[in-house]
Amino acid sequence: MNRRQIDLVEFSEKIYHLGLRHKGINGNLYEDIFIKFLREDLPQFSFYKGQILKDSFTSSQYDIIVCDKQTPHLEFLREVNPYINIVEEKHCLAVIELKKWGHPKMISNDGIIQISYKNFKSVFPNIKYFFVCLRFKDRKNFHGQTWLSLKNRLKTDGNFCFFGRTDVNDMEWITPWKEELINKNEAYFGEYERLLSLIAECKPHY
């Protein structure tokens, strides 16, 4: 599972360093590979990105939606993109808010993730909300404000970070990454596996 975690982070950096830096396209690519991995590792669930339908209300877009296996995939969407769907609330078990880079202000008590979590729970109180950042801007520039020291300030149903900041000498634009670079971030190992464990515990709320 640590290999999965590293592959996700390495992929997100590889497409950036190759020159594909449009935020929307870049984000869609690492969302898609994340969903691909989740589908392979937790085949008892369905995973999409898209929106949740509650009565006649359609939610904001969510990066990853965790659904039960019986979730219908709208045919006209599946024909165009196998990852996009509009999911009825009764089939939705959790959502994952995915960011490539997290930083201390983002996960503060009044940061954007906490605000998003509160807004989500006001509409969907029975659906889990997980936050995942592929990397965190900690290390020397933030005077000890690391993910490990700050993550518990963020009150969601689960917070995860896969990798920290690296030094320019690590040459992360050269792939595959060297073991020395990966091992510098061993404090983050196990996060993807922990996410899988929490998803596996999700139950239908109807």
Image (cartoon, grey):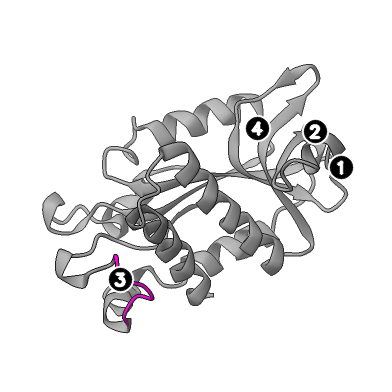
Which image quarter: residue 63?
top right
Give me the disc on residue 125: 4
Q: Position of residue 150 (x, y in %)?
A: 29, 51
Residue, disc 3: 174
Left or right? Give the position of 119 relative to 107: right
Chain-order first, disc 1 or disc 2: 1
Residue, disc 1: 72
Can residue 98 be seen at all in this image of the molecule? no
Q: Nearer the viewer, mark 3 or mark 1?
A: 3
Q: How many marks?
A: 4
Q: Are marks 4 and 1 in contact (CB under 8 Å)?
A: no
For the residues marked 4 and 1, what is the alpha-carbon distance in whole angstroms? 22 Å
Which image quarter: residue 39?
bottom right
The outermost residue toward the top is 56
Left or right? Give the position of 70 relative to 65: right
Q: Position of residue 65 (x, y in %)?
A: 66, 44
Stretch in magenta: 173-178
Q: Are marks 1 and 2 in contact (CB under 8 Å)?
A: yes
Chain-order first, disc 4 or disc 2: 2
Q: Is residue 30 above or below residue 95?
A: below
- Residue name at image x 42 percent, y 62 percent: 9
Give me the disc on residue 112: none
Left or right? Give the position of 122 relative to 23: right
